[in-house]
Image (spheres, rainbow, N blue to C red):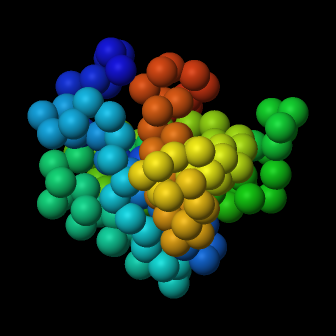
Amino acid sequence: MESQFAHRAILAIDYGKKVTGLATYTPEVDPFPLLYGTIPYRSDSELADQIRSIAIDENIEIIVLGLPLLTDGQESKMTKIVRVFAQVLASHLGEDRTIYLQDETLTSYEARERMKNSPSFNFKVDENKVDSVAAAIILEDFMQAGFREKLCKY
């Protein structure tokens, strides 16, 4: 996974109104994204606070937030919700960390498919881990340089 981000700690987020999945990439620890778990959703502000704490604790430099686009690349209602959350998150993080938006089209589907084909998951879908596996896929896609949009801070 060599890219301009390969030597920087990254947190990927699969945002959800029920559960938000997280995955991390820490170059000194592992060459691949690791599942970090999930956070139950209560409010954007509370979620942003929890992510800020994780970013501080894990020395995260870059945040990658999955952007749910339709399969034709168009934006949906959820895309707008995620963009609003991105601004909330940016206000909680301050200037120390950069937020990127990464296309997350079909990552939850891909997460389920990977679980069904993986001995690590006993070839079964674990619904409690789908969101964090999706976050890991978002992070992989980001590292492989697909679509990414740097969030402008206002």
**x and y, in percent, of residue 112 in the image:** 64, 53
Residue at (42% x, 52% y) in the render = 120
**Which quadrant of the figure has residue 73?**
top right
- Whether residue 108 sits left or right of residue 40 in the image: it is right
| Figure check: 54 above or below 58 | below
- Whether residue 14 sits left or right of residue 82 in the image: it is left
- Residue 129 visible in the shown view: yes
Instruction: Please state which of residues 36 and 80 is positioned toward the viewer in this rendering.
Output: 36
**Which quadrant of the figure has residue 25?**
top left
**x and y, in percent, of residue 46 in the image:** 41, 78
Residue at (52% x, 30% y) in the render = 141
Residue at (33% x, 71% y) in the render = 50
- Whether residue 133 sits left or right of residue 67 in the image: it is left
Report the residue that reaches farthest toward the right. Answer: 72
- Whether residue 17 sits left or right of residue 48 in the image: it is right
| Figure check: 99 above or below 150 | below
Instruction: Please state which of residues 90 and 108 is positioned toward the viewer in this rendering.
Output: 108
- Residue 83 visible in the shown view: no
**x and y, in percent, of residue 12 in the image:** 42, 47
Residue at (21% x, 36% y) in the render = 30
